[in-house]
Amino acid sequence: MAQLIKLFDYISRYEWNMYRYPTQFIRLKNEQWKNIYERWQERDSMKMKQLEKKEPKSKFHWFSRTKEKESQEHLIDFPQTKQQLIQSFLDRLFRLQVTWATSTISDISLFDERIYNDKKLKYFLQRFPDNYFLLYYPVFAIKSAPIDGEIIFISPLGIEIIHLLETDSAYFYVAGDDRFWVKERNRKQEHILSPLIPLKRTEQIIKSILKLAGVDFPIQKVVLSETNHIVCQAEPYQTRIIGKSDYPKWFEEKRHLSAPLKSQQLKATELILKHCQSISIKRPEWEEESDAFTSIDEV
């Protein structure tokens, strides 16, 4: 599961300590999954039968132990299959990631809870390995002026700046010059602003940040569409055009990257975060949060 490092202009605990939270997230995620999976495998069939007698057959339950009272068992929805269990775990983890990306111990950002229904955000987080860092439309604070950024996907091998082009699958796009592209359907055309413009703007910001710190880390721009074909005569310099037909290959490349976290990756991400805008308020009460997933079953 990719790690949500930055979400819009909300405060993130990763910007508080970039070298602590990535490894902590991986460790806690693995530990919690192991515990949940073991409990799922060891469920008591007799108790399940008793529950089925008391409840409608369409409902299933499972047993989980709270951290505070490990001796007490409580019932929560119990997935029938391993795949359902995985998805349930990822969905709970997704909500926790949003918490990490909108708060620290002392501060919190007020955010629109509709973010929980953002399918593209969830897709990027749940379909890629946890050695990827995701900055989801961050806002840069450059010379006191906020500048909207594109999606930034950082792997151990480099940085990808992604512009999503997704609409009704009946449309296809024709890559034009640096200023305009064409969106076409049933021979009806309309000109749209080239996605290369926001990509280049974000690229220039990141290049400046890394150059100033003397950090050399590969950067590539990507125009990405899972749903639409993109007609392109030649790809622009250091830019990949990934349309519907090329998307599966791009997706598998990302999915199968098994490289561990790299120091350059962490350093580059830390530098980018330092130049991102964060809007937050102090918590009403400072309550030390546990670093473990103590309430993942309730998230």
Image (tube, grey):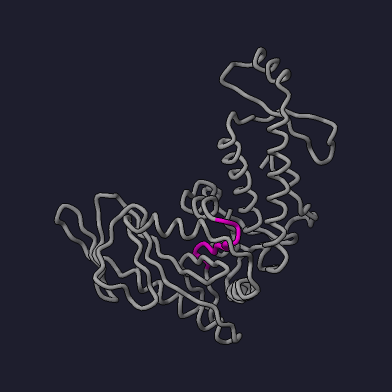
Please state the extent of the stretch shown in magenta in the rendering. 129-138
Expressed as whole percent of the image width and height from the top left, the position of residue 246 reads: 34, 59
Q: Nearer the viewer, residue 47 or 298?
A: 47
Q: Is the magenta stretch mostly helix, strand or loop?
A: loop
Residue at (69%, 28%) from the top-left corner?
62
Residue 115 in the image: above or below residue 14 = above
Q: How many labels does the image show?
A: 0
Which residue occupies the extreme left position in the image?
Answer: 187
Residue 282 in view, yes or no? no
Whether residue 213 appears in this view of the structure is yes
Q: Residue at x 50, y 81 (%)?
A: 207
- Quadrant of the drawing holding the C terminus: top right
Q: In this view, does 90 lie to the left or right of 223?
A: right
Q: Which residue is drawn at 61% across and 53% down?
A: 98
Name the image quarter holding residue 238. bottom left
Q: Position of residue 14 (x, y in %)?
A: 66, 65
Residue 74 falls left or right of residue 11: right
Of 247 and 166, the residue lying toward us = 247
Residue 285 or residue 158, whichever sits in front: 158
Q: Based on the picture, tell me whether residue 2 belongs to the magenta stretch.
A: no
